[in-house]
């Protein structure tokens, strides 16, 4: 869960970061920026700010904003019926992103969130900067983290079914609960 005031703070900060990069966000879209805490209730450590431009039956485009050292938890996009699962391209607009996929453990510049070792199994580190992009095939585990300056990136993909994504951490709940106090 996340407090309403913190939710709004994160929305405003994410919008400001996008605007500073020349990404036009309409006023009605500002309130559509969603803050995901993945049910872990510590979104500045494990969380993400996401603005979905569109999500049709077949294609989706989003901007993902990560604050300083914020980590989007390890997950994968499983097959759904005849669909092999979401294919996703992450392209960095600004900042440094430590992107992890399965392979040799080369974690060095980024870090595994404290006491969460078992939930971050993909340990092959890819350091990405503005203009870098990575294609994530369906079913491949991945997680990523912003460097000290935070980061802004595009996520272009086939149809998104967030509710069906698999997360390594069994405590993850995809719906973020907002509380008043
Ligand atoms: Zn993903």
Image (cartoon, rainbow, N blue to C red):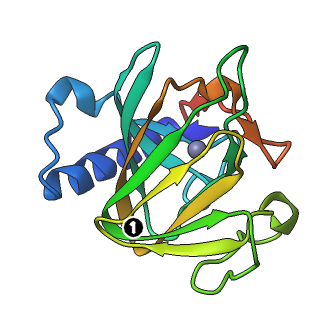
Q: Quadrant of ligand 1?
A: top right
Q: Is mark 1 within 8 Å of ligand 1?
A: no
Residue at position x 36%, y 33% in the image: 61
Q: Nearer the viewer, residue 138 or 66?
A: 138
Residue 148, given in percent of the width and then of the height, sits at 43, 78
Q: Quarter holding the N terminus? A: top right
Q: Nearer the viewer, residue 98 or 139?
A: 139
Question: Within the image, what quadrant is residue 8 found in?
Answer: top left
Residue 168, given in percent of the width and then of the height, sits at 81, 48
Give the answer, above or below, for where 29 lies relative to 47: above
Q: Nearer the viewer, residue 14 or 117?
A: 117
Pointer 1 local density, CA inside 10 Å: few below 14, some 14–19, many at least 20: some
Q: Is residue 36 left or right of residue 171?
A: left
Give the answer, above or below, for where 136 lies relative to 98: above
* Location of mark 1 (residue): 150
Disc 1 is placed on an element classified as strand
Q: Nearer the viewer, residue 64 or 132?
A: 132
Residue 92, given in percent of the width and then of the height, sits at 35, 60
Give the answer, above or below, for where 76 lies relative to 106: above
Q: Is residue 68 left or right of residue 30?
A: right
Residue at position x 21%, y 23% in the image: 28
Question: Within the image, what quadrant is residue 153 found in?
Answer: bottom left
Residue at position x 17%, y 46% in the image: 23
Residue at position x 57%, y 50% in the image: 47
Q: Is residue 152 left or right of residue 77?
A: left
Q: Quarter holding the C terminus? A: top right
Residue 53, given in percent of the width and then of the height, sits at 30, 29
Count of residue discs: 1
């Amino acid at each position: 869960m996340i407090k309403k005031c913190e939710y709004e703070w994160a929305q405003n900060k994410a919008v400001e970061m996008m605007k500073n990069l020349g990404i036009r966000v309409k006023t009605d879209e500002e309130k559509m920026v969603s803050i995901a805490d993945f049910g872990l209730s510590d979104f500045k450590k494990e969380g993400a700010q996401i603005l979905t431009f569109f999500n049709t039956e077949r294609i989706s485009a989003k901007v993902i904003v990560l604050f300083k050292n914020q980590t989007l938890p390890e997950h994968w996009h499983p097959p759904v019926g005849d669909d092999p699962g979401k294919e996703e391209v992450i392209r960095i607009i600004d900042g440094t992103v430590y992107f992890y996929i399965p392979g040799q453990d080369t974690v060095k510049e980024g870090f595994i969130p404290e006491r969460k070792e078992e939930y971050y199994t993909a340990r092959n580190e890819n350091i990405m900067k503005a203009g870098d992009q990575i294609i994530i095939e369906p079913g491949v585990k991945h997680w990523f983290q912003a460097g000290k300056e935070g980061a802004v990136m595009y996520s272009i993909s086939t149809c998104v079914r967030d509710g069906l994504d698999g997360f390594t951490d069994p405590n993850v709940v995809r719906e973020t609960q907002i509380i008043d106090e």
